[in-house]
Image (tube, rainbow, N blue to C red):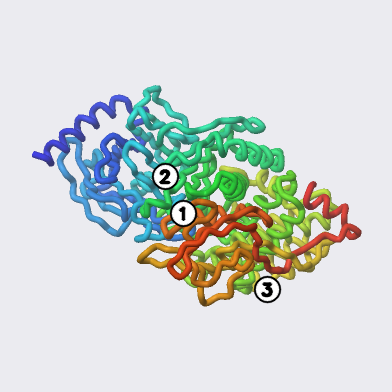
């Protein structure tokens, strides 16, 4: 009876749905957020007309913007296929992400249920902004590639997505809802690739909108415990995105851009743990810890979202055929991550000094940090080789270098162009020319890009690309910075009382959850100044109790401390509690940094950083 009831329900739904279908060739998908059970979302797909005897339905193995095989099909259960009469068709599961349907010329629809990724993050490596959350009646982070697949050879068909949802939930997205109902949303895209580039976040409405140089911006926030709101973060986002648009100038590829911010409840123990963002042509999905103070959250969003927003330049506008025709099941990766991620990361830092959001000193500190991080990775592995093979070892282990050495590659190219053009042009000018040459709908061959860049710039740029990007040679960064009158110096950096580098200065008892000062390390100046000794238990800091459950909050709070701030600490020593008051004295360390010589190349340096 239960199976029959399900089939009859499906048939009734199909009948009413087909009447309203706008295109017989479109793949029609229904996601029902009212029918969530056991944290599973039911999905029904009406197939296009299929003439072959077999067809394969794929859920993506990998999606654009990620560089790992994540196998989203592992979260799909109860996959079934039906003919027009509601009878089951034979289905064979081929692998984690693929189902072969027999008698496909009779196929009417398929149905399945999807589990979310956030509840079980300890069982997989999916980057949280590319994953999904299912919390019935509260939040559904609907990264479409987690829920919707494609029939092999039919990914170019149009897609129509219907989402039924409680009236209390609102879907934040850059797509246009074609249904006026408060409980049914209808979205249409030209093909599957477009659909998976459009995430939707359903939750209680908490959003702000504003316009920046003709672009409509939507900032939507989900904070499970109401710690943060869109009103809090939107002003900083508006300032940042206005600066970005001013920096980009004529480069403008989308009339609307959405930032979907999911704040993870770190105290729950079963929420998102991977913080950062995933870019799309008209949107960014962001995951950050909810416990982060609003000032720190705004700073993190500035760096993270600005990086993703600059992806509208590359690879979303300038890209190779591997990206234009992305293979979700067995992708071939492009050689040019140095540009897609590296130049994007460089812009995310350059625009801030260019637009006065950070100082010149801060910019040099960021460059120095990237040099240090890049030095800890393989500096002789050709970047193009790593990019093309990034899904496999040993290349995948070097992926993080796209944000370090990749950004430094962008910096060096910028410096070469500035020097050769006497400051009149830089890498942004190059990206504008590449955008005009190619654009959203025209892709380049991987092998032709270096030649095209050389033709648009100078032979010295081409020589740099061949030697330092395609070749195994470490880049002499000092020599390039010297062209701008920037040289090495020693820099004193304030540290954190509870962490030195990657090493914590505190211990946590996993049984009692109690925090204590490590006994195997010399106490740093923060502890010594307050008279706190190795082995002392830390009960409270500034009248707030801390333990394992909220240790992250303590670390984040300490990030805001300034030298000389008042601080109070309750400790337990030898079984007795003590209350200590004093001032913050931060540990510090000297690192290699850079400074500008005001008497050398001042005009050229101004063109580089402010032009």
Helix, strand or loop for disc 2: loop
Q: Is residue 68 shown to the viewer in this render?
A: yes
In this rendering, the label closer to the viewer, 1 or 3: 1
Could you give the CA–CA distance between mark 1 and mark 3, rounded to whole angstroms? 52 Å
Q: Earlier along the polypeptide chain: callout 2 or callout 1?
A: 2
Helix, strand or loop for disc 1: strand
Residue at 56 percent of width and 39 percent of height: 233
* Residue carrying label 1: 545
Picture quadrant where residue 216 is located? top right
Checking the image for residue 160, the label placed there is none
Badge 1: residue crowd in 10 Å (few <14, some 14–19, many ≥20): some
Residue located farthest toward the top when viewing the structure as drawn? 180
Where's residue 170, x and y in %?
41, 31
In this rendering, the label closer to the viewer, 3 or 2: 2
Where's residue 371, x and y in %?
67, 66
Could you give the CA–CA distance between mark 3 and mark 2, rounded to whole angstroms? 40 Å
* Residue carrying label 3: 473
* Residue carrying label 2: 143
Residue located farthest toward the left when viewing the structure as drawn? 1
Where's residue 594, x and y in %?
77, 63
Give 506 or 145, whichever is nearer the viewer.
506
Badge 3: residue crowd in 10 Å (few <14, some 14–19, many ≥20): some
Q: Earlier along the polypeptide chain: callout 1 or callout 3?
A: 3
Give 126 or 527, whichever is nearer the viewer.
527
Q: Is residue 308 shown to the viewer in this render?
A: no
Badge 2: residue crowd in 10 Å (few <14, some 14–19, many ≥20): many
Could you give the CA–CA distance between mark 2 and mark 1, rounded to whole angstroms? 37 Å
Left or right position of 214 against 270: right
Give 494 or 336, whichever is nearer the viewer.
494
Q: Quadrant of the N terminus?
A: top left
């Amino acid at each position: 009876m239960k199976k029959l009831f399900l089939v009859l329900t499906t048939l009734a739904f199909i009948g009413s749905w087909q009447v309203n279908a706008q295109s017989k060739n479109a793949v029609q998908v229904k996601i029902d957020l009212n029918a969530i059970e056991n944290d599973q979302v039911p999905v029904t797909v009406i197939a296009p007309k299929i003439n072959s005897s077999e067809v394969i339905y794929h859920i993506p193995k990998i999606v654009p913007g990620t560089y790992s095989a994540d196998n989203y099909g592992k979260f799909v259960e109860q996959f079934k296929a039906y003919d027009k009469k509601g009878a089951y068709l034979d289905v064979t599961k081929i692998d984690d992400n693929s189902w072969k349907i027999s008698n496909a010329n009779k196929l009417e629809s398929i149905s399945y249920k999807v589990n979310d990724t956030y509840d079980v993050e300890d069982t997989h490596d999916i980057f949280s902004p590319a994953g999904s959350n299912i919390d019935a009646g509260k939040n559904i982070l609907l990264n479409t590639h987690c829920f919707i697949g494609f029939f092999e050879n039919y990914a170019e068909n149009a897609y129509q997505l219907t989402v039924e949802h409680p009236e209390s939930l609102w879907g934040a997205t850059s797509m246009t809802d074609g249904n006026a109902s408060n409980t049914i949303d209808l979205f249409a895209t030209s093909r599957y690739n477009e659909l998976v580039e459009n995430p939707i976040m359903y939750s209680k409405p908490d959003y702000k909108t504003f316009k920046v140089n003709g672009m409509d911006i939507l900032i939507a926030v989900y904070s499970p415990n109401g710690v943060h709101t869109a009103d809090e973060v939107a002003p900083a986002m508006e300032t940042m995105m206005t600066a970005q648009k001013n920096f980009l100038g004529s480069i403008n590829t989308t009339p609307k851009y959405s930032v979907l911010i999911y704040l993870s409840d770190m105290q729950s123990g079963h929420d998102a743990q991977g913080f950062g963002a995933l870019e799309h042509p008209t949107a960014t999905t962001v995951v950050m810890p909810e416990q982060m103070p609003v000032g720190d959250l705004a700073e993190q969003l500035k760096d993270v979202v600005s990086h993703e927003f600059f992806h509208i330049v590359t690879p979303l506008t300038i890209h190779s055929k591997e990206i234009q025709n992305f293979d979700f099941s067995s992708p071939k990766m492009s050689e040019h991550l140095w540009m897609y991620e590296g130049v994007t990361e460089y812009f995310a830092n350059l625009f801030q000094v260019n637009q006065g959001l950070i100082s010149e000193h801060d910019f040099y500190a960021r460059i120095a940090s990237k040099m240090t991080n890049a030095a800890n990775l393989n500096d002789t592995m050709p970047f193009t080789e790593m990019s093309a093979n990034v899904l496999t070892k040993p290349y995948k282990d070097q992926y993080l270098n796209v944000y370090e050495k990749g950004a430094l590659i962008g910096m060096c190219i910028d410096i070469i162009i500035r020097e050769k053009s006497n400051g009149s042009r830089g890498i942004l000018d190059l990206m504008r020319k590449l955008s005009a040459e190619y654009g959203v709908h025209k892709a380049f061959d991987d092998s032709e890009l270096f030649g095209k860049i050389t033709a648009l710039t100078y032979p010295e740029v081409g020589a740099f690309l061949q030697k330092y990007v395609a070749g195994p040679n470490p880049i002499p960064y000092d020599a390039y910075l010297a062209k701008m009158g920037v040289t090495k110096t020693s820099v004193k950096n304030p540290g954190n009382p509870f962490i030195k580098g990657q090493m914590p200065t505190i211990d946590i008892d996993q049984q009692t959850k109690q925090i204590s000062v490590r006994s195997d390390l010399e106490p740093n100046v923060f502890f010594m100044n307050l008279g706190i000794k190795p082995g002392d238990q830390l009960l409270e800091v500034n009248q707030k109790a801390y333990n394992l459950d909220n240790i992250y909050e303590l670390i984040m709070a300490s990030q805001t401390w300034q030298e000389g701030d008042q601080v109070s600490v309750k400790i337990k020593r030898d079984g007795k509690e003590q209350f200590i008051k004093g001032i913050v004295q931060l540990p510090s360390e000297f690192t290699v940094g850079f400074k500008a010589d005001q008497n050398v190349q001042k005009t050229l340096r101004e063109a580089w950083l402010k032009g």
